[in-house]
């Protein structure tokens, strides 16, 4: 019961559709509809809360060092950043980049260790013994100066294209990243996430698979509404759990807080993620709203 087809069949049941599929790639109409919705639903739902099961820590691969001291990498980095890193291909959302991780990671393949004393000031690695992780300032951008290697099927790899690649800009040397990873296997999903995924998927595929009669359409609309409400409830529960179990999210949806990072002081990036001239960084902006088939978001 831990295959994508199992999740799809649960969604068909929740949508009141008397169909069963054996595989998302089998080519039948329900499988085609499910395949079009499955991947997008999974990615949106992963971004909708800081799910514990999808939290991943990884070394970032250096693309450029503005100080020019690191061999085999570029030196063109958009100001005011010092270092530019490749965006992980399985990253759904950056949660934060720690500036006091407390150790120097292994040098990524093909790179040379960044010198201990850069020519310009950066955020130095500091010991974290007895201290919690502190976030650094960063911004996600697209840079055409460091395109991926030619010959790739670009539309299959997140963050890579012939026009450039998605990058992370920061002043942290030898940076690590804490992020929400793409978790394709239902066997590792949180029970809350699984229920939310089933309900979310059901709400997306209900109308495309119903019969065309008015009665069926009305029933489908009611089922879709119920599944949307169920998905929202599970997302809300996950956000509450996140607030209770982790220190890295404090995004309460209070009206006056909705604009607190708009037009940040002295920042060309509008203050996003604390990316301004002073103060600590943020934890990636909390979570994203999840959009639903009825036009609502949560």
Image: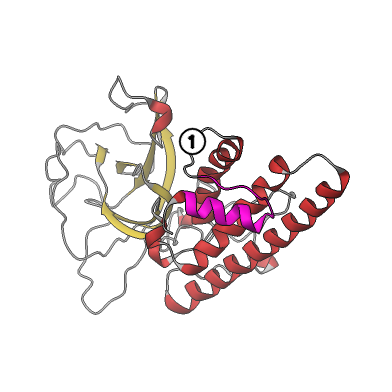
Q: Is residue 3 magenta?
A: no
- Does dot 1 land on a helix, a strand or a loop? loop
| Left or right relative to 20: residue 156 | left
Front in this rendered view, residue 12 or 287 = 12
The answer to which of 220 and 101 lies nearer the viewer is: 220
Quadrant occupied by the C terminus: bottom right
Mark 1 closeness class: few <14, some 14–19, many ≥20 residues within 10 Å: few
Quadrant hosting residue 127? bottom left
Residue 16 painted magenta: yes
| Towards the viewer: 7 or 151 | 7
Find residue 149 and report its horizontal and vertical position in percent. 27, 24
Percent coordinates x, y for residue 67 in the rendering: 22, 39
> What is the x, y in percent for residue 45?
53, 55
Q: Position of residue 15 (x, y in %)?
A: 67, 54
User: Which residue has dot 1 on it?
Assistant: 26
Q: Is residue 67 visible?
A: yes
The magenta stretch spans which residues? 5-21
The residue under the point 39% across, 22% down is 162
Going 51% across and 68% down the picture, which residue do you hit?
192
Farthest top residue in view: 151
Asked whether, in this view, residue 50 is left or right of residue 292, the answer is left
Residue 264 in view here: no
Which residue corresponds to the image point at 30% horizontal and 19% vertical from the top-left?
A: 151
């Amino acid at each position: 019961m831990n295959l994508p087809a199992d999740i799809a069949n649960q969604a068909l049941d929740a949508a009141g559709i008397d169909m069963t599929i054996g595989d998302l790639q089998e080519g039948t109409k329900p499988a085609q509809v499910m395949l079009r919705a499955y991947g997008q639903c999974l990615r949106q739902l992963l971004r909708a809360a800081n799910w514990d099961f999808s939290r991943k820590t990884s070394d970032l691969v250096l693309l450029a060092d503005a100080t020019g001291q690191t061999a085999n990498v570029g030196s063109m980095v958009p100001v005011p950043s010092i270092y530019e890193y490749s965006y992980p291909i399985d990253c759904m959302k950056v949660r934060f980049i720690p500036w006091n991780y407390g150790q120097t990671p292994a040098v990524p393949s093909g790179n040379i260790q960044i010198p201990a004393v850069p020519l310009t000031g950066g955020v130095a690695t500091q010991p974290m013994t007895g201290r919690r992780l502190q976030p650094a300032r960063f911004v996600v951008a697209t840079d055409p100066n460091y395109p991926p290697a030619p010959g790739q099927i670009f539309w299959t790899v997140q963050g890579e294209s012939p026009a450039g690649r998605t990058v992370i800009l920061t002043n942290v040397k030898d940076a690590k990243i804490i992020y929400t990873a793409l978790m394709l296997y239902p066997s590792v999903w949180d029970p809350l996430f699984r229920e939310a995924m089933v309900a979310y998927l059901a709400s997306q595929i209900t109308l495309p698979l119903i019969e065309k009669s008015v009665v069926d359409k009305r029933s489908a609309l009611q089922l879709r509404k119920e599944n949307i409400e169920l998905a929202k409830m599970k997302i809300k529960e996950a956000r509450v759990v996140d607030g209770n179990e982790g220190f890295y999210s404090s995004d309460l949806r209070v009206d006056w807080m909705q604009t607190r990072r708009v037009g940040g002081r002295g920042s060309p990036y509008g203050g996003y993620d604390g990316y301004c001239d002073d103060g600590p960084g943020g934890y990636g902006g909390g979570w994203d709203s999840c959009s639903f088939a009825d036009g609502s978001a949560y």
